[in-house]
Image (cartoon, rainbow, N blue to C red):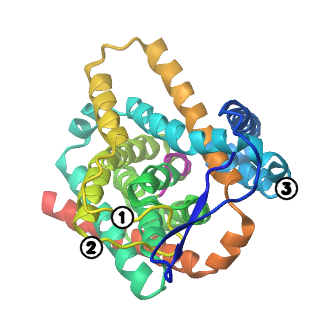
Amino acid sequence: MASPEKSWNPRMNRAAVVLPNSAPAAHGVLPGLAVTGLCALIAWAAAQAPWLQQRGIGVLTVAIVFGMLAGNTLYPRIADRGGEGVDFAKARLLRLGIVLYGLRLTFQDIGDVGWPVVAIDAAVLCSTFALACVLGTRLFGLDRRTAMLIGAGSSICGAAAVMATGPVVKGRADQIAVAVATVVVFGTLSMFLYPAVYALAAQHVGSGMSETAYGVFTGSTVHEVAQVLAAGRAVGEHAADTALIAKMVRVMMLAPFLLLLSAVLSRMPDRQDAGAETPVRGSVAVPWFALGFIVLAGVNSLGILPPALVAAALDLDTALLAMAMAALGLSTRFSSLREAGLRPLGLAAVLFVWLLAGGAGINLLLNRLQG
């Protein structure tokens, strides 16, 4: 049976439980896992299409889109039997997938690029997330969780960062889906705009931007890894390689970001946004999957794991994250997205402009300090 949804009832001053249906006993997690697995498999097959690959649209994005389509058409008919497994995929499989994501990185990546790239990535991350939190709540009137999720997706690594931040901020499925949608929209736009900016700079600014500088700029500001590669390859292989390294360093900041965010939220006054599943508590909820992420990145840095094992683990990681994204889509209703309106896209647009213009300024400033 699908897990109850909690809504806030101010008159009763407590969380009122609203049961989505009156189905009998739960049937376990297997039916729901089978549904999410089927969605992930279809998404994987669809993501192999050259049109999608050329535009940096990977299996995770396709999985959430397909999950949302199924979740608003066929899935409601079997939600009473599949709800437990879908919830399991959204929670447990997601966290395990984030842990295995650490195998994509090594600490040597930081050593290869040096402190300037680390400083650029850190400055972009902190400034973008802070801007999201301030403008999201004060200018666009978004709830704090949605603003933080959009900020995480824009400042770190797109959909994976949104999904990883969701459990820390206690975000709902529709809030996470809205944040992922902003990543898709503006990350896709960046794949076409960034190469155009590079060509424009080459035409009107003397000798233009070097491929190395362009790669660092792209890796430090574009949302998704796949989008970074697409934007980099549009300029050249060296630009793509540099962009990927800068992006991987940025991805490695996900774990300390989650730990710091959890600590900050624990010090804030107890409160609950409207419709949130659980209140923010006054104790530090250490995201264990963030620690696991760091541990596996460290193990991978030692080079002791057989390449075949790492490759198999990464394939499993993609499958787990695709199932989690599909589960998120299955739990999202279009009515919830319509209620969110244009405000989330407005915030994401402002952050996109900041990543493009402010990110360029940060890159230029720190590169000059290095010189």
- Which element type, helix, strand or loop, lies under badge 3? loop
Quadrant of the snapshot with the C terminus: bottom left
**The disc label shown at residue 348, or none:** none
Q: Amino acid at mark 2?
A: Pro
Q: Is residue 368 magenta?
A: no
- Above or below, 13 against 28 in this view is below
Q: Pinpoint residue 270: horizontal percent, then vertical percent.
A: 31, 71
Q: Which residues are magenta?
A: 223-230
Q: Tag 2 or tag 3, which sits nearer the N-term?
A: 3
Q: Pinpoint residue 260: horizontal percent, then vertical percent.
A: 24, 56
**The disc label shown at residue 73, or none:** 3
Main secondary-structure element of the magenta-colored stretch: helix
CA gap between label 2 and label 1 equals 8 Å
Q: Pinpoint residue 194: horizontal percent, then vertical percent.
A: 51, 62
CA gap between label 3 and label 2 equals 40 Å
Q: Pinpoint residue 126: horizontal percent, then vertical percent.
A: 28, 65
In this rendering, which labeled residue sits more in front, label 3 or label 1? 1
Characterize the local packing of mark 2: few (<14), some (14-19) or many (20 or more) Cα atoms within 10 angstroms: few
Q: Amino acid at mark 3?
A: Thr
Q: Is residue 228 magenta?
A: yes
Q: Nearer the viewer, residue 361 or 34?
A: 34
Q: Tag 1 or tag 3, which sits nearer the N-term?
A: 3
The residue under label 1 is 280
The residue under label 2 is 269
Q: Nearer the viewer, residue 24 or 58?
A: 24
Quadrant of the snapshot with the N terminus: top right
Q: Amino acid at mark 1?
A: Val
Asked whether residue 371 is in view, the answer is no
